[in-house]
Image (cartoon, rainbow, N blue to C red):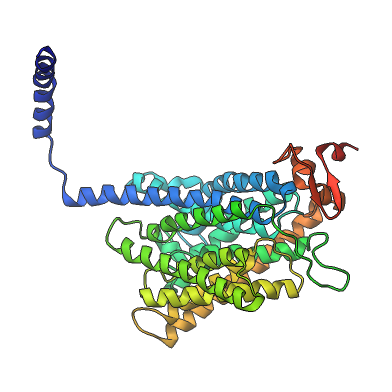
Amino acid sequence: MRKRTSILLLALLFGAPLLAAAADAEPMTADAVQNNLNFVWTLVAAFLVFLMQAGFAMVEAGFTRAKNACNIMMKNLMDFSVGSLAFWAVGFGLMFGTTNGLFGTTDFFFSGATGDGEAWNYAFWMFQVVFAATAATIISGAVAERTKFSAYMVYSVFVSALIYPIFGGWAWGSLFHGSGWLEGLGFIDFAGSSVVHSVGGWLALAGAIVVGPRAGKFDKNGNVKPIPGHNIPIAALGVFLLWFGWYGFNPGSTTTGDSSIAIIAVTTTLAAAAGAVSAMLYTWFKFGKSDIGMTLNGALAGLVGITAGCANVSAVSAVIIGLVAGILVVFSVMFFDKIKVDDPVGAVSVHGVCGAWGTLAAGLFDSAGFSLHTVGVQLIGIATCFAWAFTTGFILFKVIDMVIGMRVSKEEELAGLDFSEHGASAYPDFHTVRLGSVFTPEDTKK
């Protein structure tokens, strides 16, 4: 009885003033509610895309050898860290500032955040910086296990500050203060099959060519010698994290909390599922057993493939796009092995090749109807993306190679970059055995 009386007294003391304050407050309008929802959805989506950094790290670590796991964690942590600063200082302005026709000339150091709409500008920047980080981190897997950490840091800055933002501005500049010549033509790339994935993929191709293949990847006759990854379950976890993060990547690109999120989530899911199924079935048919690595990359290929057209294709079209992407990634991986481009995780195939396919598919399966003009514009965008990213990337990597060197020594590569670059070990209680030799942290001191 005494407890009930106390509760009633508290309700009278504190409840009445709260009710009075609520009564005096002006009711929120529908526009205000929608505006708040847009903020929440955009930032939640940005946080989901940030989680993709963990996915990339797990995929890359799992598909490579144990002696390089710490190095891969460091790269995926630091490309976001240095890339965010570079994008804040320079990249955002080049991508979204008032343009001279080729690149932005304002909003450096995020100066455009002041004035009207300041709060939304911060939300918009947060969403864009995680996209920039995704483009930069794609390169990591293609040059893994033999690239100097210092070289990686240098090119991460240039990719985030210059290469990614300029092409991004051509396609997406009007989202802020700029405008882009590709979007002016009617280029379709809703969430970044080309802007993010192909840019990252073609940069990865340039990097893999400049740094060269890993020791032992090809024999003296040029035949491929498989170098198995050390932890496929970790790689699979990475794919699940990436798939989950893609629900921020694609639906989040609406930057609006409305019903359009639903269909984009569905097309994203169907394409990923179809990509995994087609890669599994194709490898099962070709090799006699379904290949787990290719199947995982098939899911990612479907996700990359649907990213451009996720908002303007039907569910059936999404399935077709994913099915093609899942088979295409297998062909592409084998092709690059054949021409002796060593890409440990298949980054070029997943992001570069399937990003190009997804960009074309956005035009081929456009819900507005098939148009040769639309397909032509998509082809222009694909060609421009390759020419810009591969050429600038090749020049960047060559300059870095001449100045500080892209590649570690053969001894450091055999010992593992964990020891030689960071003095660390991901698995300190175990020896790392690869290429017929045993290496421990003590070996690097001899």
Q: Quadrant of the N terminus?
A: top left
Apparent side of residue 379 relative to residue 145 in the rendered image (left or right): left
Q: Position of residue 442 (x, y in %)?
A: 85, 36
Residue at the extreme front of the image, as rendered: 288
161 vs 215, nearest the viewer: 215
Observer-nearest of 35 and 360: 360
The vertical placement of 251 against 279, above or below, is: above
Residue 417 x/y as whole percent:
76, 47
Q: Residue at x 69, y 61 (%)?
A: 344
Identify the residue at the far bottom of this view: 372
Rendering coords of residue 425 (x, y %): 73, 39
Which quadrant is home to the C terminus? top right
Q: Nearer the viewer, residue 240 or 85?
A: 240
Outermost residue on the top side: it is 2
Residue beneath the point at 71% across and 55% down: 144
Horizontal arrangement in the rendering, residue 150 relative to residue 62 (left or right): right
Residue 445 in sight here: yes
Residue 382: give x, y in percent of width and height.
Answer: 55, 75
Q: Quadrant of residue 365?
A: bottom left
Identify which residue is drawn at 63% across, 71% down. Answer: 289
Name the residue at the right extreme: 446
Q: Is residue 331 left or right of residue 320?
A: right
Q: Is residue 444 above or below residue 160?
A: above
Evaluate whether residue 167 shows in this view.
no
